Image (cartoon, rainbow, N blue to C red):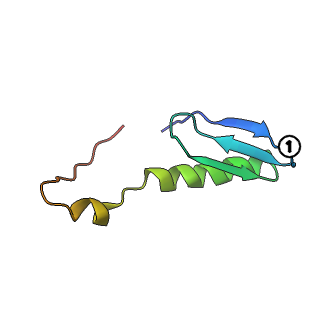
Amino acid sequence: MKIKVILEPSEEGGFTVYVPSLPGCISEGETEEEALANIKEAIELYLEPVEDELLTEEGKDLREITV
C-alpha cells in the first residue's frame, strides 16, 4: 500500500512528517530517514485494528477488507 506523507523541516530542527489522509497521524525525527521510518511505524499502529474493543459491543460484526 502506498500512502502520501508530508515531510517538512521543524523550526526546532529535525523534520516533522504527517499523513493528510489519516487525521492525527504525525511523527518526527532528527533526519529525513528517521522521520520517514517513524511515520511508517505510526501508520502501521494507526491502521492496526483494535479487535477486542470492537467485539465487546453487541450487534457489531467485525469484517476485514483489503484496500
Drawn side of residue 36 relative to residue 19, left or right:
right
**Image position of 49 with respect to 20: above or below:** below
Drawn side of residue 30 relative to residue 47, left or right:
right
Residue 52 coordinates in the image, percent (x, y) = 29, 66
Q: SS at mark 1?
A: loop
Drawn side of residue 9 relative to residue 1, left or right:
right
Residue drawn at 17 percent across, 52 percent down? 61
Q: Nearer the viewer, residue 53 or 48?
A: 53
| Location of the C terminus (image quadrant) | top left
**Image position of 22 with respect to 37: above or below:** above
Q: Amino acid at mark 1?
A: Glu
Residue 19 coordinates in the image, percent (x, y) = 58, 39
Residue 29 coordinates in the image, percent (x, y) = 76, 53
Q: How many marks?
A: 1
Drawn side of residue 39 relative to residue 8, left or right:
left
Residue picked out by circle 1: 11
Q: Nearer the viewer, residue 23 or 31?
A: 23
**Image position of 52 with respect to 39: above or below:** below
Residue drawn at 63 percent across, 41 percent down? 18
Residue drawn at 66 percent across, 54 percent down? 38
- The 10 Å Cα crowd at callout 1, few under 14, some 14 to 19, many 20 or more, is few
Residue drawn at 19 percent across, 61 percent down? 57
